[in-house]
Image: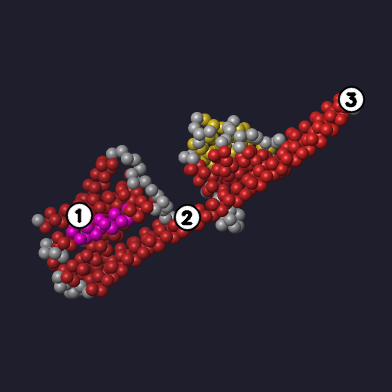
Amino acid sequence: MNNIIEACASIVECCIFIRICNGFLGFKSEKKKWLKTLFVFVPLALVDVFLSQLEGFENISIFMLLLILLVYSFVFLKGKKWEKVLVSVIPTVTALPINLIVMSAFSLLVGNDRAEIMPGGTMRIPVLFFTKAIFFFACEIVIKLRKKQYQSLTGFQWTIQLSCFLISFLMATLLWNISRQQPETSPLFLIIFICIGILNILLYVIMNKMQRDNITREEYNLLKANIISQEKLAVEVRERYSEVKTLKHDMKHYLTTAAGMISDKKPFEAKAYIERIIEEKINSSNVGVNTGSAVIDAVINGKITLCNSKGIKMKCSIDTQFESTYDIDISILLSNLLDNAIIGCDPDNPYIELVVSHKKSLTFITVKNSISSSILKNNPELKTDKSNKNEHGYGIRSIKDIAKKYDGSVEFKEENGNFIAEIWLKMEI
């Protein structure tokens, strides 16, 4: 009977192990989840029910459990590598302190008689019930905290968290072995076990608070960068408006002069004068594109003017008319893409090509620029090389965020000596 009770407790423990792994990470694919669960449950149960009961194999069984959960997480569950390692360790390092705390507490209640809380003892069933119940609720709390968080810890933070869990695990194990060698269980051991558990909880809370603060700071810097981009857009729109206003004002003088030449019967001189005005004033001011949006036009035309001043050849191919709904997002996107292209251009062969097309509900944007050497090879994450990283380096992040907003995608690649940025956006135009 005692063996059956211990086996049932071990099976319940295995179910909780699997529950926290599945709930914390989630499956890569929703197909045949029961078969994947069974795949890990069978070896877990064999190890926890049989191997852990053999004298001298307790520690080996713990490492076997960790290995099985680790393989299961990497094969079937989604998430980052550090998350998979951590979620494989959490069940063991959580179950041990809980077991030690409950067993120490019950041992004190029965007058330090350990036989009462060990297999076959009169208090064994309450001990098993409380350890598994507390372990289950602790795992559920971890899963709920995970679902409420929209961010995940960095690899470095996972390393610290994992290291502290393992150190706590070793400390608790050593203390438990020491307490077993003493004729009486001191309340001090119970206090130590509780403190170890509290320290791990506090560390987890602190790590997540730090990450939330980091994300808040990143969002603030990104918002600040977008505001700066919008200010630049306003300046560019104002400059284009000023050019048109000046041209409109001067046009009256040009037409009056041409009309005077015609009145003086100088048609050839009038024709030559008009052609010169068209070439010098009208064509030079109409060096851009027409996308249907004054804001987006101002951005592209402003970059064309900038490229001309820097001796960069810029080619535009746009077959899309944008609605005002997308003005700000598309203008910020194009501004960041073209700024990066201008900065990264090969000085010996400066060339930029912008292509914007629309297919069904998808808008496709490509910006290509010549490069003197591989950028992705030397800087695969495209991090800024400017000294003040708190003020710069948010262009790529802004591009990715806008693409995400419109259920799109971003890809950076290199072909034939060119750096290419490809963006797909889902938008009705």
Looking at the rendering, in which quadrant would you find the N terminus?
A: bottom left
Left of 264 or right of it: where is 427? left
- Taking the spot 83% from the left edge, 27% from the top edge, the residue there is 271
| Real-space CA distance between mark 1 and mark 2, rounded to the nearest whole angstrom | 40 Å
The crowd level at tag 3 (other Cα within 10 Å; few <14, some 14-19, many 20+) is few
Q: Amino acid at mark 2?
A: Ile
Q: Earlier in the sequence, mark 3 or mark 1?
A: 1
Element marked by disc 3? loop
Of tags 2 and 3, the one toward the viewer is: 3
Q: Amino acid at mark 1?
A: Ser
Q: Quadrant of residue 277?
A: top right
| Label 1 environment density (alpha carbons within 10 Å; few <14, some 14–19, many ≥20) | many
- In the picture of the structure, the residue carrying the numbered disc 3 is 265
Q: Residue 64, position in %: x, y?
A: 27, 54
Q: Which residues are magenta?
A: 129-143
Does the magenta-highlighted stretch encompass residue 138?
A: yes
Is 373 on the left or on the right of 124, as rendered? right
- In the rendered image, residue 274 lying in the magenta stretch gets the answer no
Q: Nearer the viewer, residue 126 or 144?
A: 144
Identity of the amino acid at label 3? Answer: Lys
Q: Secondary structure at mark 1?
A: helix
Pick whichever, 333 or 308, lies toward us.
333
Which-is-in-front pick, marks 3 and 1?
3
For residue 10, the mark is 1
Circle 1 or circle 2, nearest the eye: 2
Task: Please report whichever mark, 2 or 3, sits nearer to the chain's N-terminal start.
Answer: 2
